[in-house]
Amino acid sequence: MKLRVPAVSIFLCLFYLNVNAQVTDKAALATSILTDSRLDTIQNRALKLLSGFSAGTSYNEVWIRDFNTFIKGSLKVHPKEKVKEMLLMFFKIQGDDGNIVDGVVDSARASVGYKYRYSRLLPGWAAHKNTVETDQESSLVQAVKKYIDITGDASILTEVIGAKTVLQRIEDAFIYIQKNRWSARYGLVTGATTIDWGDVQSETGWGVAINNKTKWAIDIYDNAMYVIALHDFMAMKPSEYKTKQNWTVVANGIKQNVRKYLWVSPAQKYLPHIYLNGSPFSKDFNESEILYTGGSICAILAGFNTNAEIKQINAQMLAAAAKEKHATIGITVYPPYPAAQYPNMHPYIYQNGGDWTWFGGRMTWALVNNGLAKEAYAELTPMIERAIANKGFYEWYDVQTGAPKGSGDFRGEAGVLYDAITVLKQWAIKNK
């Protein structure tokens, strides 16, 4: 006699077996993360380095784009009042039009070839703005949000600086972008032509300043950073505060236009640039073949992509890294721009195909937040091993030789690794 088992029963058995397997797999992964001593080693080393605020050993300045990525670690080793003071410095030297500077530095050490600015609200300090990039305003707002999330101290928003509250100054910064870095045609943020998230334009000369050769463009990084900042502001502002604009509507409009103009669905990747006054590159150069990793990561964090698209983006990043012996998903772009096209930065140098944990590490929480913790741990591991092997946090790495480059104590890498490990550990605690 044959025993007939209803098909629905077989289905349910298979379903529960699969669920149990997933739970077991998650528990095993969680155990691996929580018992990985390398993660503890990196976090301990990172906190020691975050005793300071400058970008690293090669820099005197406190850069807001860097500070935004290590502020959580800073709050572990500094009193919140000190961290708050550092954030407020950027508002004290804010431009009359609302713009935010890149870096602040002791005026006695203001010796680089920047055009410095000074303010009576910040005596003893000088500041400078990289005018080819459009991420300073967004970085400061994101940093303020992180400060409030960690400390619970929302009083920073009502601090009065030069007759304006920080809330008002944040909106001034947003309005600066709307007026000065905005394409009405595309409804998107603009900036000079740089490599992905980089801050050096392609044209020869002083690469961090707008000049008569500058080619204005739209890219994914600037727009993703701005949308993250807009959402952060709306989340942290007091409910009774009346905004000058509905910034949620602005953010939603940018997302729609990013999908319309920058996302290339057939290729499952972002277009490097949309040009507004001509391209700096020769007509026979196909820039659209280049993969922008950092901007793509920020786009995921801004909520621009579906889970299926995130998997495709991640697969492309892994494929790019596999083409170079010493690369991780932190490789800035692939392939790099040829020297003839980007004379200000040759291939495999710095932001043109160098490997930056500062950005690659951010993919960890992009993946974890989208149900891909296993991938996050696997892809972060070579970055962890590299930092341990080199006994330091380096600015970037040569993907052809594996040699560490740039600042030897780069706080951006330390901060991103600290945060990435924290995210992994939090996931593991929930799933052990």
Image (tube, grey):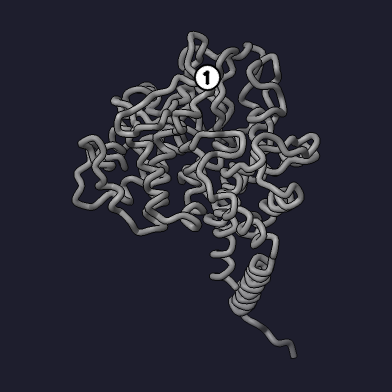
| Residue nearest the observer in this picture, 362 or 250 | 362
| Residue nearest the observer in this picture, 177 or 96 | 96
Residue 2 occupies quadrant: bottom right
How far from the left and from the top, in percent, is residue 33? Answer: 65, 65
How far from the left and from the top, in percent, is residue 89? Answer: 37, 38
> Is 3 rendered above or below residue 201?
below
Q: Secondary structure at mark 1?
A: loop
Query: Which residue is depicted at the point 30% across and 40% down?
Result: 247
| Residue nearest the observer in this picture, 196 or 43 | 43
How far from the left and from the top, in percent, is residue 410? Answer: 61, 42
- Left or right side of 32 for 174: left
- Left or right side of 204 for 101: left
Residue 116 occupies quadrant: top left
Q: Residue furthest bottom?
A: 1
Q: Which residue is mark 1?
A: 113
Q: Residue furthest top?
A: 212
How far from the left and from the top, in percent, is residue 233? Answer: 33, 45
Quarter of the image with the C terminus is bottom right
- For the residue marked with disc 1, what is the amino acid? Gly
Query: Which residue is depicted at the point 42% across and 51% down?
Result: 146
Quarter of the image with the N terminus is bottom right
Query: Which residue is depicted at the point 55% across and 59% down?
Result: 423
For the image, the number of numbered tags is 1
> Is residue 152 in view?
yes
Residue 7 occupies quadrant: bottom right
Query: Which residue is depicted at the point 54% across and 70% down?
Result: 430
> Is residue 218 in view?
no
> Is 386 rendered above or below residue 93?
below
Instruction: Give neighbour class at mark 1: few <14, some 14-19, many 20+ (Cα, 10 Å).
Output: few
- Left or right side of 124 for 221: right
